[in-house]
Structure formats: C-alpha cells, structure tokens
Image (cartoon, grey):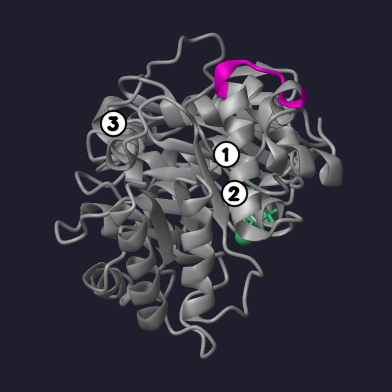
Amino acid sequence: MDSYLHLGEPADPDKYAVCKYRVTTDLPIEKAAEAIAAEQSTGTWTGISTLNTQIFNDLGARVIDITGDMVTVEFPTDDFSIEVGAVPQILSVIAGNLFGLGSLKGVRLEDVTFPKDILNQFKGPKFGADGMRKMLNRPEKPLVGTIVKPKIGLGPKATADYVYESGAGGLTNSKDDETLVDQRFCPIEDRTVAVAEAIDRLESEGIRMMHAINVSTRGDKIVELAEKVQSWGAREIMVDVITCGFGAVQALAEDPSIKVPIHVHRTMHGAFTKDPLHGVAMLPLTKLVRMCGGDALHIGTLGVGKMSGSSKEDSNLAACLGDDVPYKRMMPVCSGGVYPGIVEAIVAKAGMNVQIQAGGGVAGHPDGVRGGAKAMSQAVDAAFAGIPKEEYAKDHRELALALEKWGSK
Ligand code: CAP
Ligand code: MG
C-alpha cells in the first residue's frame, strides 16, 4: 500500500474537498499529517486485511502540502454522502476524530474548500444580503440594528416597546438575544405578536424594520416553531447554529413554508474557535452556514468590539460575500460590544455591505433606547457619507452624547 503523502501534487478542487489544518506535534510533521489523513479517511491504528489497494486509492485522503505547521489534506468527493447535502457527515470527515488523536498536541481546521459536486448539494440563502436589503428598502447603507437588552427579563410589551423605539430612532433591525426563546416571563407567542404590532405601527409611519425572533429549540420542533412564529407575524427568525446544529438552519432554509430571512447567531463557537492552535476556525463554519441557507451570520467585530477577534475575520467577511460559490450573498453581522464610537472603524474594515448591531451600545444611551438608536444610526450615516464622527456629532446631539459616554476608536 502506498503512503498518504502526495507532497507537491497540485490540489484538484473539482475532485476533492481541500482542508488546511494547523498542527502542533512532537512527531515529525509528515507522520502527524499522515495520521490525520489516515484517521479521517480509510485508516485505523493498525494494518487491516480488509483495506485493499482500490479502496486506498479511491477513498484515501492525500496530504498534498506541508508548509511550516500548516498541513493541506484533500478528501475525495466519494468520501462524502451522495446528493443530500449533509453537514453532520461532512464534519465527521473534515473535523472529526482527529481532534482526539493522542499523537497531536493540537490541531485546528483553518479552512476548507468544497468541490462543485458537494457545493451543488446545498441551496444557500433564500434571501441573503440583497434580499434583506430589498425587504428593508435599504439598498446601500449598512444595516444597523440592536439586540434587545437585558438579555432576559423583559416581557412581551417591554420588548415590543424597545423594538418600536429602535425603529423610531432609525434602526433597520432588531433581534432577540441568543438565550431568549420561550421563557415564562416572555412567552414566544405573546412576544412575537406584540413585536409584529410594533413593526406594523412603524410601517404605517413609513419606517421599514425587521426583528428576528429566536426559534432555537430541539431539532424535531424547530420548523414547527418557525412556522408558528411566522403565522404570529414574525418577519425574520433567528437560530443559534452551534447549539441547534447546521441541520436546523438547513431545515428552516429549505422548508418551502418558511418565507422569512434567517439570522444566524453563533453562541458557543468560542469553545472551539478561540484557541489558535486547536479546534475549528470560524471560516469553515461561515462557509457551512452559507451553504445551509443562513441569510445573515455573526462574524465578530474585526478586532474592534468586546469579543476576541482579529484580522482573520476578514476572511469570514469574504466567505459571506464572495462570488466563488453558487449561492446568494450572506449578510455579515458585526456584533458584540458595539457602540456608536466604533462604527466608523467597523465600516473602514468591513465596508458597506454589513449589518452593525449594538445591544448595550443602544440601551445604555443617556437618552434611552430611542436616543441610542438615533446615535447608532447617525454613526452609520456619518460613516456612509465619509464624514468624521466628531464632525458629524457637532449637529447630532445623540451621537455627541454617545461619544461623550463611551468614547471612540
Ligand atoms: C451583543 C450580544 C451578542 C454578541 C455575540 C451579546 O450584545 O448580544 O450575542 O454579539 O458575539 O450578548 O454580547 P452587546 P458574536 O452589543 O451588548 O455586546 O457576534 O461575536 O458572536
Ligand atoms: Mg447576545
């Protein structure tokens, strides 16, 4: 039997899924790379009589490059399930047992590129960034939103009032927080109905806005819950992709009865994206969410907000918006510790095709939620017009108050 090493052979993106792994090991790196290729394709810990040359040649993974600690492995398309677009099985191949291999001190999946045969199994977003912009009648400026805060505790009416004030202050989007679904203090039906009334009222005043109701629940109930909230008036839904699973996003996106955009939150991702030497980077997750049909996805604040992050998030931005895959563009969402004073810095890094949202950075404004919404929307208007925020704040009181309270970057 041959080796799994095919160093120097060019990657064939039509026939293989190409993965990049950052590897930390005491072994010679070639041995570690072979261990990954073996474990994730045909391998086991010992030679076996049932592994013949044909299986090895047709289905064995191939290590095609080792540069420093970065190992590139390609997996034949036939290693994956046929025709169903199943992320669980894909993840078991590209991001499965390898994390537990005792011979590796650390291994991190940094990126994956899928062949057309796999990409074509998925449908991508139903609405995407452009569809959401159309619904909001906001063709060019960044979308600007809020997360209703406190995270938990407000009842349906207080939530709806918050949404109304946000829209009246100029925000295009609002959303439930990731831990709010259907608690006693805020039942989902009452919340959805109250928020829908607030949004209808805004619309009657000439303001377009959408609020994402969080439908994150058990797998066998999520589509049913989304259908219900839609019938109660929701114009957008939200799902926590890591806790619910990629299959939940896909089930919602591909169900013909769901006719509203899906905002995708990534709570818990830090458990495996944060360690630079072990786990899974955000980039492969972003690619998978777009494949599964997320319309908007959190990508961090490009190193500017409260969550840890770095310039690597640029690649997540490209994975949301790039035209190298056969899907609609997905709206990147910058969130986490955002306030008006950092909007300019976010726009400078992310450009205009982005949704910028602030929870505390709206609700904590000295003039309350409407004042916070005005300040955020003024900050976006200033960045869109290319006017420095300090200049713009001279005749925009809410922005001035926000800069005074929180400063800027
Ligand atoms: C933001 C947020 C979001 C984070 C998650 C929060 O609130 O609601 O869940 O954006 O991080 O609870 O932190 P604030 P990420 O605006 O008050 O910080 O987007 O990086 O996944
Ligand atoms: Mg949150």
Q: Which mark is residue 327?
A: 3
Which amino acid does the dot numbered 1 rest on?
A: Ser
Q: Which mark is residue 342?
A: none
Q: Which mark is residue 377?
A: 1
Q: CA distance from mark 2 to mark 1?
A: 6 Å
Between 25 and 131, the one lying in front of the other is 131
Q: Residue at x 60, y 45 (%)?
A: 374
Q: CA distance from mark 3 to mark 2?
A: 32 Å
- The magenta span reads 384-390
Residue 54, position as x, y percentages in the image: 31, 32
Q: Which residue is mark 2?
A: 373
Between 95 and 376, the one lying in front of the other is 376
Q: CA distance from mark 3 to mark 1?
A: 30 Å
Q: Nearer the viewer, mark 3 or mark 2?
A: 2
Circles 2 and 1: CB atoms closer than 8 Å:
yes
In the rendered view, tell whether residue 174 sits above or below residue 134.
Answer: below
